[in-house]
Amino acid sequence: MDCNICFEDFNQESRIPKVLPCGHTICLQCLLQSDRRECPTCRRAFNSPPSLLPTNFVLLRLMESAPDGGVSAVSCPPTTAAPLSLRHSASEAPGWCSACRAPATPRCRDRDGHSVVSAKTALSRHLPEGVLQRAAGQLEDLLRQCEEPLTLLTLLTAGAWDVTLRSHSGERVMAGTVTDTDDPVIKLMWLALAARAGVSEIRPSAPPPPPQPECERESAAAPTPSNAGRRPGPPTAPKPSAAVRKLSPVRLPLRMLDVDKVSNTGPNEWQELKEVLAQVEARGVSRLTGVSCSDDPDWSLRLLRVAAPTVVNLSLTNPSKAHIREVLAMPRLTRLSVWSSEAAQHGTRPRLLLPPGEGALRWLRVGGYGLPRATLQSVLQANSHTLQELWLTVGTAGSEEWPWSCSDLHVLLKRCWLRELTKLVLHRWDGYTSSHTDTDCYQQRISVQEVLPRPGAAVLCSRCDVVDREDF
């Protein structure tokens, strides 16, 4: 069992496991190296000197009883390793950053929301116990799912392959060579690629014709007998090929368009509204901001429809049920900000149910008066398999209405099962009497942390953790 901060194994010397008042266990060396007396996991302060904190003797006994010095029969729940300012070895220890999904760097340890764990711990989370047994039970189904047996046969019989893997974003590339194609594990890998990845052969294009010898070029350029005696005229331009003639200029989508001023004018400024619609319909737009849905609902709905094929980032205010449906049907949308004002809350807040798992959002912010609880749950469920970061205006337990008071946020999020969520920011809005106490906030975050599927997901409070509002 190792410390979640330095990744060194606990021992009875310098790495004594110390239990903090909040309940987390950290090694003595990390506590002594810290400049502050607070838990590196939950940031809760303590007054006692680190050496006087109680020792986790239960953990030490478990380590002694395990044959390899680790914990075999009992596994301790994972915790989120929050940033901790250390003077030397802990900040240089290797590890894996769950937020970056990459090897940890020193910056990962100094940023909120970044959970750094050892590679061994990360592997155990992504390859949990029993995954190989479950995979073995799917082999027969995998073979039946292979729709291209010739592709699989090509993979199995080629002898050796140079393999290149490129992430969907294009930021990560890995390469290697597979030579032992008789290895059963390699054969299973080819089967999985043929059945699940849709691998297909790319035919190489025809090679260019060989260069023409100099003598042939001269003879070809010489006049033919039919041309003999004719006065040479001016050179004529070569005719373009059919392929070239068919090409037409490609107009890329607008990179960014802010329609805040336009969408707030209302139907009296029809000409300007029409020009914006025509511009977006002709070229598309990648980043669309400032869409006010309440001032002119019909125009804003038409704008969303013409922008739908190309928009990736979108921010809008006071959406209706129709607006929400249109937004969540956008095929390329990955980043969404929704804000609802007080004026839009009198009987117009959208309440709708959406099919689960059909969205593709990776980043979502719901602010102001937000969305009705049932609608928010439906939106989260629709994006449960892709959502990585969520900013939510919500209060702690109290007497106000949703979202200013909420005593069971963990129940709501448990129903959504946000399997890819790595960061949740609970925004406590200062513009309204939002319920918030330090004790209730701590309990709310602990309860939420326990129900999030992804180990190490960061749960932050905008007040307690002083999280600045991220620009859209």
Image (tube, helix red, strand yellow):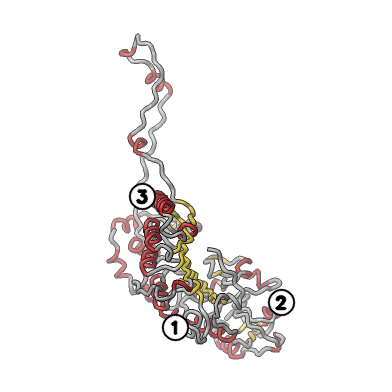
Q: Which mark is residue 44?
A: none
Disc 1 versus disc 3: nearer the observer? 1
Label 2 CA crowd tier, 10 Å (few <14, some 14–19, many 20+)? few
Vertically, is 357 above or below 61? above
Query: How crowded is the residue under tag 3: few (<14 C-alpha within 10 Å), some, or many (20+)?
Result: few
Query: Which residue is identified by label 2?
Result: 35
Classify residue 197 by image quadrant. bottom left
Task: Look at 41% across and 54% down and name the residue there.
Answer: 270
Circle 1 residues within 10 Å: few <14, some 14–19, many ≥20:
few
- Whether tag 1 and tag 3 are in contact, CB under 8 A, the answer is no
Q: CA distance from mark 3 to mark 2?
A: 58 Å
**What kind of residue is marked 3?**
Ile
Residue 290 in view: yes
For label 3, the residue is 202
Q: Residue furthest front?
A: 268
Residue 172, position in %: x, y?
50, 58
Q: Residue beneath label 1, please?
A: 411
